[in-house]
């Protein structure tokens, strides 16, 4: 099986020796990997040198190389032009913005997202059925089901005309979801002010970091499927914004990021923080390492999907390919729904 390799050690240098990726630190060989086995290489800005001959070999092999900062935010991705795939998928994706396909895809993505949020709450409710918070959690999921129906009922001629309706229903469902998360965390004595990307409380910073990890995985899948990362539908266009990646990410946020982070916190982990050189506060290295392990373990876990068991990272790729088929051939796209 092709694998993903993450390099995030200070001063780690990357070299090519024959057809192998060789990692060296202070002149000593630390690891070796066959280049032909690498699907994705994720390199932190903490690393040292990478040879041009290695980059060439990786690209020719079809390996995607992602460069990320200390928050796991990707700042560059290198890949072979062959990953652009069928031009038809990209052309139809762009055309889909102006017809009903953009609405159909957006509705399916967001109904899958809200259902996965419901299933995440149900996952934690299983072990809390006898607690006083159980009825309140069930109540939040019932409200969320109502907004799934409202999303499904939206009709129009293009996403431009109905975006506000779809986003409004999704946002109302999200309020109930994050209220449920707050209830789950509060039962363990953990303060959570609610979900907002700009807040610097530990829970929101953990979520932001987890979503950055997910974003690079979804970006990789969309590129491999031959789709355009910037041509989104319900995430509006903005210079440098990978809007379509953000669209597709919505399906996976609850099950791949929220669930392991809530589990980690409710099991007693106390996230550590530290001040960065620019004066901002962020999670400390110990917490970041643990988060990476938890989320990567979740990506490697298996779930049933379309009658077979797949790793979640494979399901992300399968969903991207299904979207490409939706645009190329008009075949209905069905969003992934997580188990609980």
Image: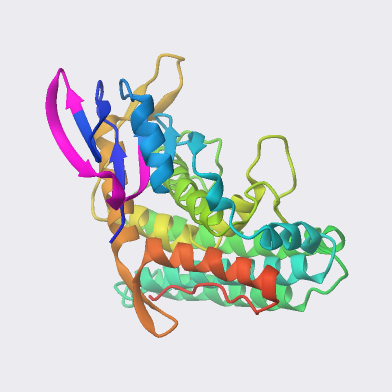
Which corner quadrant of the image does residue 226 belong to? bottom right
What residue lies at 38% left-to-right and 26% top-to-bottom?
A: 52
Residue 114 seen in the current view: yes
Q: Which of 263 and 250 is in front in this view?
A: 250
Q: Where is residue 147 in the image (x, y as percent from the top left)?
A: 67, 72
Is 26 magenta? The answer is: yes
Quick one: quadrant of the C terminus?
bottom left
Quick one: quadrant of the N terminus?
bottom left
What residue lies at 47% left-to-right and 36% top-to-bottom?
A: 73
Residue 281 relative to residue 324: left or right: left
Residue range in magenta is 24-42
Q: Position of residue 177 (x, y in %)?
A: 53, 62
In the image, is residue 207 above or below residue 27? below
Residue 203 seen in the current view: no
Q: Nearer the viewer, residue 108 or 91?
A: 91
In the image, is residue 134 above or below residue 252? below
Residue 22 relative to residue 97: left or right: left
Extreme front residue here? 18
Q: Which of 281 and 291 is in front in this view?
A: 291
Q: Position of residue 45 (x, y in %)?
A: 38, 25
What residue lies at 49% left-to-right and 56% top-to-bottom?
A: 221
């Amino acid at each position: 099986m092709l694998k993903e390799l993450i390099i995030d050690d200070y001063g780690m240098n990357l070299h090519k020796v024959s057809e192998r990726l060789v990692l060296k630190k202070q002149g000593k060989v630390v690891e070796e990997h066959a280049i032909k086995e690498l699907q994705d290489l994720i390199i932190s800005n903490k690393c040292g040198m990478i040879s041009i001959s290695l980059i060439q070999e990786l690209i020719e092999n079809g390996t995607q190389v992602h460069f990320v900062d200390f928050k796991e935010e990707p700042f560059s991705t290198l890949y072979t032009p062959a990953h652009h795939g069928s031009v038809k998928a990209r052309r139809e994706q762009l055309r889909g913005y102006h017809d009903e396909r953009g609405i159909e895809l957006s509705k399916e993505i967001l109904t899958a997202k809200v259902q996965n949020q419901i299933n995440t709450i149900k996952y934690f409710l299983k072990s809390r059925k006898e607690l006083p918070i159980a009825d309140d959690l069930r109540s939040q999921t019932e409200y969320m089901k109502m907004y799934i129906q409202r999303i499904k009922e939206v009709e129009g001629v293009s996403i431009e005309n109905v975006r506000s309706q779809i986003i409004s229903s999704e946002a109302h469902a999200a309020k109930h979801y994050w209220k449920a998360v707050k209830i789950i965390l509060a039962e363990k004595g953990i303060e959570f002010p609610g979900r907002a990307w700009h807040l610097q409380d530990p829970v929101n910073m953990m979520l932001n970091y987890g979503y950055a990890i997910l974003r690079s995985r979804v970006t990789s899948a969309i590129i491999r499927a031959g789709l355009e990362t910037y041509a989104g539908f319900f995430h509006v266009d903005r210079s440098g914004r990978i809007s379509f990646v953000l669209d597709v990410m919505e399906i996976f946020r609850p099950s791949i990021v929220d669930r392991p982070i809530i589990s980690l916190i409710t099991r007693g982990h106390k996230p550590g923080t530290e001040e960065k050189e620019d004066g901002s506060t962020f999670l400390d290295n110990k917490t970041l390492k643990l988060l990476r392990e938890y989320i990567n373990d979740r990506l490697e876990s298996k779930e049933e999907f379309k009658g077979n068991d797949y790793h979640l990272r494979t399901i992300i790729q399968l969903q991207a390919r299904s979207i490409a088929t939706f645009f190329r051939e008009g075949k209905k796209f069905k969003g992934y729904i997580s188990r609980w």
